[in-house]
Amino acid sequence: MTQLDAALASRFAATALGHVTREYPNHIMHVLTGPQDALTPREMHPIFFGSFDWHSCVHGWWTLFTLYRLYPDMPEAAAIRALADDLFTAEKAADEAAYLSRPESRGFERPYGWAWLLMLAAELARHHTEEGRRWSATLAPLATIFAERFKAFLPLADYPVRVGTHYNTAFALRLTLDYADVFDPELAAACRAAAARWHEGDRDCQAWEPSQDEFLSPTLMEAALMRRALPPADFAAWFHAFLPRLSDGQPATLLSPARVSDRTDGKIAHLDGLNLSRAWCWREILDGLPDADERRAVMAQAAEVHLDAALPHVTGDYMGEHWLASFALLALMDGAPVPSS
């Protein structure tokens, strides 16, 4: 099974350091109410101004902090520490919060960026050094804002969003539970209630995927959410009904990596992310099933072939490398050895 190791961690960290402060090119999600709102990315977001867009910068920092915790002696550690000290300050976090307080920012980055910010907060809470506690405290007000936004939004969300892009609600709730299960029981309950409302009755999924610019599998992302949202026995029964023909290799599309025809095209490059996120989902689903489940070999093989297809392409072109390391890290975390500190 492919695992995260020190060399791969260093490669991912170097890549993320190369883009979290790269302000341009930049895709801005911003509502202008007048000429006074025509601002640069750094003026709007003094912490998360790089990486082509706000959410990619957030999960670029999740990548950096995760690797810094796992490999504190990596060659990039000093640069990560210095950059975090420069950017994760109370003043800059207050400016990020001020942007969110604009009425026009109510739907800013919903739900993908919301979930990644909470995932970042959950990661920083695992850092028990003095510096880690400082960075975590700096980010905490932003995490509170997005947690409260989720709690206000989920009761209004009568339907899931099943597309394989940023609007996918299963992905957002799966990430959010990493934060909510530790820090916000009310939010955790709201996530599980929404997951049940949206997906508990789903049966015999036909898996009409991939689409041309997906980086998430609507099918497997839903299953990964339900694996986290349900007790193990309930999940095993739900999953059997959801993909009842998996032991026969069906739906076959879920077992074969997507082809990526042009990695310089930002949308087509999404398909490398699809392959990585499928590998992550397959590994997550495996963790939720009994050891004797006959489908485990099929899923383990699917995870490995998807990783093999995508890992060589995490770096190489900016349209992919400004975000793909985060998805590679998600896929590899279950197999990561715990380095000695």
Image: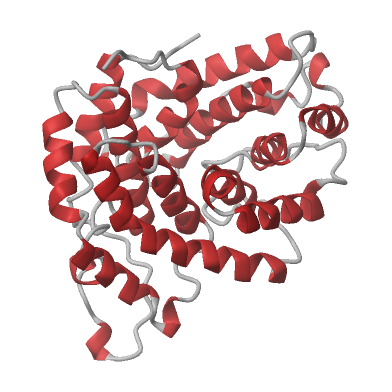
Figure quadrant of residue 157: bottom right
Quarter of the image where the C terminus is located: top left
Q: Residue 166, image x and y in percent?
A: 52, 53
Compared to residue 308, the image places residue 100 above or below, namely: below
Which residue is at 23% across, 58% downward? 47
Compared to residue 6, the image places residue 56 above or below, namely: below
Q: Residue furthest bottom?
A: 34
Residue 75 in the figure: left or right of residue 194 = left
Is any part of residue 259 visible from this angle? Answer: no
Which residue is at 70% across, 34% downward? 227
Which residue is at 74% across, 20% downward? 289
Q: Residue 101, image x and y in percent?
A: 39, 79
Q: Residue 160, image x and y in percent?
A: 71, 57
Compared to residue 163, the image places residue 131 above or below, namely: above
Q: How is the image coloured?
A: secondary structure
Q: Residue 49, image x and y in percent?
A: 24, 59
Figure quadrant of residue 150: bottom right
Q: Nearer the viewer, residue 241 or 322?
A: 241
Q: Nearer the viewer, residue 313 or 141?
A: 141
Residue 142 in the figure: left or right of residue 251 = left
Q: Nearer the viewer, residue 25 or 131?
A: 131
Is any part of residue 44 visible from this angle? Answer: yes
